[in-house]
Image (cartoon, rainbow, N blue to C red):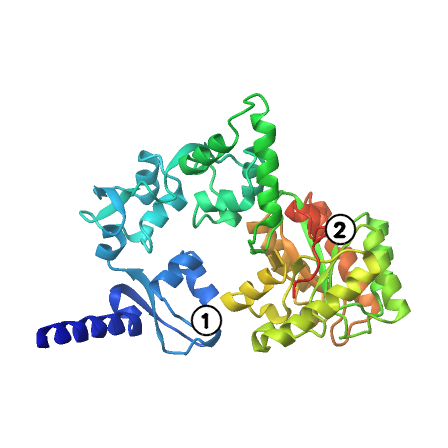
C-alpha cells in the first residue's frame, strides 16, 4: 500500500518535471548570447539553422520577447541528434565535408541536415559520427532524387514533377529555396506518397499523370503554407515595390511605369496617408490593377502586427481586404507587414496563415529612400550591391516618405528602372516575380 503510493508520487513527480523543464531534456553543445537588435530570424539565419531546427533546440522560446544576454542554443549534443531515429551512421574521416557525405549517401542537403539537426558543417570533427539514414517511418524515405541545375528554383522543380509546394517541402524538410546549389540533390518522390497515390488511383494507368497533377493542384489550393520572399523565382526579373500609399504622386508614378513598360507592386494602407474610401484614391487603385500592377496589403493603418490583440489584428487586415475587394474584385493573399514586424514571430505567421495569407513579401534591396530622400547615387549603389548577390531582387521603395516630392519620386524610380535595364533585368509584378497568383481564389473570403 505504502510503496504503491510512493511510486505513484514518483511517477507524478517525474511527469511534472519533464513537463515543467522541457529544456533540461536537451543538452546544448554550443550556445549564443542575445545582443541588442537580435531577432530569432537573424540568429537562425546567421547560424545556418532552419527555423524548425532552431525551435527544436530552444523549445518554448518566445521570439517576440528576446532578452538581451539570454542564452540561445545553436547546437544539440551529438548524442541527442543521432540517437533518436538514426538507422545508420557514418564516422567522419579527415578531409570529409558535409557535402561529400550527403553526396555519397545519395541524400539531399536538407535530408542530411534534418538527420543531423544543428550540425556545424564548417567544423566537422574527425571520429565523430553523423547520421546517414533515418528510421524508415520518417519523411526521409525518398524514392527518387533530382539534381539541381543552374537556374533552377523550387517552384520550377515541384511544378515539373507535378507536386504541390507543400508536398515538396514535406519531403525536403529544411530546404532553403532562396539558396539552391546546383549539383545538390532534392527529393522529388517519397515512397510514402507514392503508395498513397497508387492505392487511390488504381483504375486507369494511362491517365495517371494528369490525375496526379490535378490532385496535387487541389492540395496546393487548400494548403496552409506561408513563405517569406525576398527574391523572384526567375533570374533577370526584379520586382519594384512601393509601400505606404496611396499617396499624391502615385498617378504620376503610374504614368512613368507605363512609359517604361514596367509592372510593379503596391503595398497599400487603407487609412494612412490617404483615405481609401475617397474616390480619387479608389480610382488610382483601380488604375494600378487595370494597368497590370499588383495591389497588396500593408495593413489598414500601418500597424505593428506584433503589438495587436488577435481581434484588432484581424480588423487591421480585414478592413483593408474588404476595401480592396470592393475596388478590384480581388483579395490579396500577399502581405508586407509594416516594420517587418512578425517576420520571426510564429504567432503572427500562424495568424496570417489563418486569415488566408500565403506570401510574406520582404525585399532583397532596401533603397532606404525615406532616409536618403531619394538620393539617386545612394540608391543605385544599394541596387548595385544587391545585384552582386542576386539577379532577381525584390526592391523596396515608398509611395510616401517625409519630404517626398513628385520630382524626387519620379527621378529616382526612372533611374532605378534604367539602371536595372542596363543590367539586363526586367521589372515584373509580384505575381510574375513569385510565379504564383498573389490574390485569393474567387470563393475564398476572409475567415471569421
Ligand atoms: Zn510601411
What residue would you read off at disc 2?
A: 418
Relative placement, left or right, of 401 versus 284 is left
Q: Which residue is painted at 80% across and 50% down in the image?
A: 292
Percent from the top left, x then y, of residue 268?
74, 66
**Tag 2 or tag 1, which sits nearer the N-term?**
1
Relative to 10, say whether 121 is above or below. Answer: above
Secondary structure beneath dot 2 equals helix
Tally of marks: 2
Tell me if residue 99 can be seen. Answer: yes
Please identify the quarter of the rendering in which residue 72 is found.
Answer: bottom left
Q: Which residue is painted at 36% across and 76% down in the image?
A: 70
Relative to 248, say whether 211 is above or below. Answer: above
Relative to 137, say whether 365 is above or below. Answer: below
Please identify the quarter of the rendering in which residue 287 is found.
Answer: bottom right
Q: CA distance from mark 1 to mark 2?
A: 41 Å
Please identify the quarter of the rendering in which residue 22 is found.
Answer: bottom left
What residue would you read off at disc 1?
A: 63
Relative placement, left or right, of 83 versus 284 is left
Residue 91 has which mark? none
| Foreground residue among 328 and 263 | 328
Q: Residue furthest top?
A: 206
Q: Which residue is painted at 45% across and 71% down in the image?
A: 63
Relative to 270, say whether 266 is above or below. Answer: above
Amino acid at each position: 500500500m505504502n510503496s504503491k503510493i510512493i511510486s505513484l508520487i514518483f511517477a507524478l513527480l517525474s511527469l511534472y518535471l519533464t513537463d515543467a523543464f522541457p529544456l533540461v531534456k536537451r543538452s546544448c553543445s554550443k550556445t549564443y548570447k542575445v545582443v541588442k537588435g537580435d531577432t530569432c530570424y537573424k540568429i537562425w539565419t546567421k547560424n545556418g539553422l532552419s527555423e524548425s531546427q532552431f525551435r527544436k533546440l530552444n523549445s518554448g522560446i518566445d521570439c517576440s520577447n528576446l532578452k538581451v544576454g539570454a542564452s540561445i542554443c545553436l547546437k544539440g549534443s551529438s548524442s541527442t541528434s543521432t540517437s533518436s531515429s538514426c538507422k545508420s551512421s557514418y564516422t567522419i574521416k579527415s578531409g570529409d565535408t558535409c557535402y561529400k557525405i550527403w553526396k555519397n549517401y545519395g541524400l539531399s542537403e536538407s535530408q542530411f541536415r534534418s538527420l543531423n539537426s544543428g550540425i556545424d558543417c564548417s567544423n566537422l570533427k574527425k571520429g565523430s559520427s553523423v547520421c546517414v539514414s533515418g528510421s524508415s517511418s520518417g519523411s526521409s524515405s525518398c524514392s527518387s532524387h533530382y539534381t539541381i541545375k543552374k537556374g533552377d528554383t523550387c517552384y520550377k522543380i515541384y511544378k515539373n514533377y507535378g507536386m504541390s509546394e507543400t508536398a515538396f517541402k514535406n519531403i525536403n524538410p529544411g530546404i532553403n529555396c532562396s539558396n539552391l546549389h546546383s549539383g545538390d540533390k532534392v527529393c522529388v518522390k517519397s515512397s510514402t506518397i507514392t503508395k498513397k497515390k497508387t492505392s487511390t488511383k488504381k483504375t486507369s494507368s494511362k491517365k495517371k499523370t494528369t490525375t496526379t497533377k490535378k490532385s496535387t493542384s487541389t492540395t496546393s489550393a487548400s494548403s496552409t503554407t506561408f513563405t517569406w520572399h525576398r527574391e523572384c523565382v526567375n533570374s533577370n526579373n526584379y520586382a519594384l515595390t512601393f509601400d505606404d500609399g496611396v499617396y499624391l504622386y502615385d498617378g504620376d508614378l503610374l504614368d512613368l511605369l507605363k512609359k517604361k513598360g514596367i509592372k510593379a507592386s503596391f503595398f497599400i494602407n487603407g487609412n494612412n496617408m490617404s483615405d481609401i474610401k475617397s474616390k480619387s484614391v479608389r480610382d488610382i487603385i483601380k488604375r494600378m490593377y487595370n494597368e497590370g500592377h499588383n495591389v497588396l496589403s500593408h495593413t489598414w493603418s500601418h500597424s505593428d502586427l506584433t503589438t495587436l490583440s488577435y481581434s484588432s489584428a484581424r480588423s487591421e487586415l480585414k478592413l483593408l481586404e474588404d476595401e480592396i475587394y470592393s475596388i478590384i474584385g480581388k483579395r490579396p493573399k500577399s502581405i508586407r507587414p509594416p516594420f517587418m514586424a512578425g517576420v520571426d514571430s510564429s504567432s503572427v505567421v500562424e495568424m496570417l496563415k489563418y486569415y488566408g495569407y500565403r506570401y510574406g513579401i520582404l525585399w532583397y534591396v532596401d533603397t532606404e529612400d525615406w532616409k536618403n530622400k531619394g538620393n539617386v547615387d545612394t540608391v543605385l549603389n544599394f541596387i548595385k550591391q544587391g545585384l552582386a548577390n542576386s539577379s532577381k531582387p525584390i526592391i523596396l521603395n515608398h509611395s510616401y516618405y517625409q519630404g517626398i516630392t513628385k520630382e524626387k519620386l519620379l527621378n529616382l524610380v526612372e533611374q532605378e528602372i534604367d539602371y536595372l535595364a542596363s543590367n539586363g533585368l526586367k521589372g515584373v509584378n509580384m505575381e510574375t516575380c513569385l510565379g504564383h497568383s498573389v490574390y485569393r481564389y474567387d470563393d475564398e473570403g476572409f475567415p471569421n
